[in-house]
Image (tube, grey):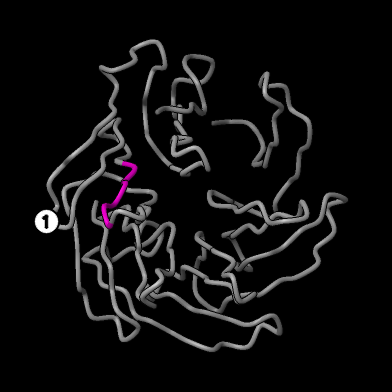
Amino acid sequence: GSSPNRLLEVDPDGRPSWEHTPPSICVIFQPLPGGNVLLAYGGKPTGVQEIDRAHRVVWECRSSCPQTLGCERLPNGNTLLAEQGPCRVVEVDRRGIVVGITPLTTSEKPYHLQVRNVHKLASGNFLAAHEGEGAVREVDPRGRVVWERTGVENAGDALRLPSGNTVISCGTQRRVIEVDQGGRIVWEFGAADAPELNLVWISSIQRLRNGNLLVGNFVRGHEGKGVHAFEVT
């Protein structure tokens, strides 16, 4: 909305308990073990930062692309950057040295909506959400598309489940879907399932340890009406 760009931590009752101001637009972040936070930021410059609870930058990798808005810290300590213009996944080590580049496929020409979040799968492939095109694709390390699901407007994120199914945040379709390997919907939660939440734009999803989903609701143009996040079984 019209408020300053900020990252908030809230307690179980929804009260803000910690706040951080990123250097520029930030839509994807990852809490790390120990309390630090990894965040991607756009603007000039653009890149990924790791910050501690005292707001100190303890690690940073700047990108030469026009905008980076997705990131992921890997178990081996490396970090993924979802770069736009060109659209690709870049993996860097703790020194910021590039150890891998994988091109991503999208029909979206302007860079701002080419890709949102990216995840590295156990197979070594990458799962990417292409917001502008409304598609989710799995590609191998060379960038070859091995799986895709299209028709998901403003897809902000996609998660591969242990079952092999994929959960997708479907943006302005105001729903979360789970699809099987054939792309068929096997589970769905949408605006009609909980009108009191005022689902506007499903922007993010996180699978919790108990198997539930934590879902982000971008209340664009509806500030003060509905919820920013909810947990669903």
Q: Residue at x 70, y 51 (%)?
A: 22
Vertical side of 104 occupied by 99: above or below = below
Within-10-Å neighbours for mark 1: few <14, some 14–19, many 20+? few
Q: Residue at x 24, y 32 (%)?
A: 188
Q: Is residue 194 left or right of residue 224?
A: left
Q: Quadrant of residue 128?
A: bottom left
Q: Which residue is mark 1?
A: 182
Q: Quadrant of the C terminus?
A: top left
Q: Residue at x 75, y 70 (%)?
A: 59
Across and down, in percent, residue 119 comes to 43, 64
Q: Residue furthest top?
A: 196
Vertical side of 187 occupied by 41: above or below = below
Across and down, in percent, residue 84 comes to 42, 69
Q: Residue at x 54, y 52 (%)?
A: 28
Vertical side of 102 occupied by 200: above or below = above
Q: Quadrant of residue 93?
A: bottom right
Q: Is residue 11 left or right of residue 221?
A: right
Q: Is residue 165 covered in magenta?
A: yes
Q: Quadrant of residue 222?
A: top left
What residue span does the magenta drawing correspond to? 164-169
